[in-house]
Amino acid sequence: MVTQQRFESGGVKLPLLFKGFDSSVPDVSVSGLQLDSRKITSGDLFLATCGFGCHAGKFIQQAIENGAVAAAIEPPFSASGFDIDNLSVPAFWSQGLTHNASEIAGRFFDHPSRALN
């Protein structure tokens, strides 16, 4: 059970959250998920998705400064001077992140909708 693992280990491991979506996921524990870099708290995973107006990848540095311990980045994303390998936290490309974010959140929170009647 993901919820029990989260409390016992201090977080949820990214490979568990991204199983079946991405194979090159760093073995990092996260204590939260966030799509908005301004709302990141220490220990969170930043989900940098393709937005309607802009790509959230533009805000990765802000997310790191606010405490993100890792970043999942939906391709395609490019910005002047951006190099995924030079970030100060583990980061990885995650194809279809916008589509998969709901399932990732469900796994993180142990699928709370399954308890609804």
Image (tube, grey):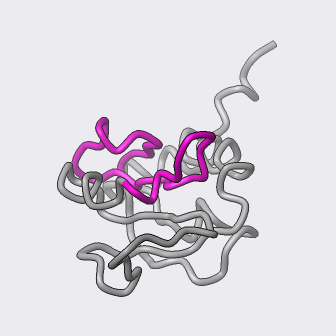
Residue 10 image-quadrant placement: bottom left
Residue 114 vertical placement versus 60 (above, below): above
Q: Position of residue 76 (x, y in %)?
A: 63, 69
Q: Nearer the viewer, residue 52 or 90?
A: 52
Q: Is residue 18 left or right of residue 79?
A: right
* Residue range of the region highlighted in magenta in the rendering: 31-58
Q: Residue furthest front?
A: 80
Q: Position of residue 40 (x, y in %)?
A: 30, 43
Residue 5 vertical placement versus 110 (above, below): below
Q: Residue furthest right?
A: 117
Residue under the point 50% across and 75% down: 92
Residue 52 image-quadrant placement: top right
Residue under the point 59% across and 59% down: 17
Q: Nearer the viewer, residue 100 or 28?
A: 100
Q: Position of residue 36 (x, y in %)?
A: 40, 39
Residue under the point 47% across and 51% down: 56
Quadrant the C terminus occupies: top right
Q: Nearer the viewer, residue 89 or 17?
A: 89
Residue 111 vertical placement versus 32 (above, below): above
Q: Nearer the viewer, residue 63 or 20?
A: 63
Q: Position of residue 22 (x, y in %)?
A: 67, 74
The total number of labels drawn is 0
Q: Is residue 12 left or right of residue 37?
A: right
Q: Is residue 36 highlighted in magenta?
A: yes
Residue 52 vertical placement versus 23 (above, below): above
Q: Is residue 60 highlighted in magenta?
A: no
Residue under the point 58% across and 83% down: 24
Q: Residue furthest top?
A: 117
